[in-house]
Amino acid sequence: MSAHGQPADGDGDVSRALAEFAETIEMGFNDIQQTLTDPATAAAYGRTLDVVERALQGSHANGMLTDEQLGELTGVIDGMRKAPGLL
């Protein structure tokens, strides 16, 4: 899956792209002396993504996002959810 939630060319590309995305996210947490390998941090990260996804759904319901935009952004969030398990 690409960063925009679209299928990438081949399973290796998908795995590599997601692994690189996970590492980038992890580096952001490392900057604040945190890690997504810590269960409490991973749980807070997951909950934060839930809140962001609900905000996007609300924006869609209010006509601020199209179906396509919501799908693209939800695809990104779905990829981000996988980060803790890829580290």
Image: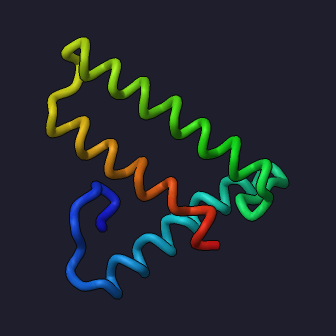
Residue 47 picture location, percent across and down: 61, 38
Q: Quadrant of residue 23?
A: bottom right
* Residue 69 vertical placement versus 27 (above, below): above
Q: Residue furthest top?
A: 62
Left or right of residue 84, residue 18 in this image: left
Residue 84 picture location, percent across and down: 62, 62
Q: Quadrant of the N terminus?
A: bottom left
Q: Quadrant of residue 16?
A: bottom left
Total labels: the figure holds 0
* Residue 19 vertical placement versus 57 (above, below): below
Question: Could you tell me which residue is drawn at 42 percent across and 34 percent down?
Answer: 53
Left or right of residue 32, residue 9 in this image: left
Residue 67 picture location, percent across and down: 15, 33
Question: Could you tell me which residue is drawn at 42 percent across and 58 percent down?
Answer: 79
Left or right of residue 53, residue 83 in this image: right
Left or right of residue 9, residue 24 in this image: right
Residue 38 picture location, percent across and down: 79, 59
Q: Quadrant of the C terminus?
A: bottom right
**Applied colour scheme:** rainbow
Question: Could you tell me which residue is drawn at 69 percent across and 47 percent down?
Answer: 43
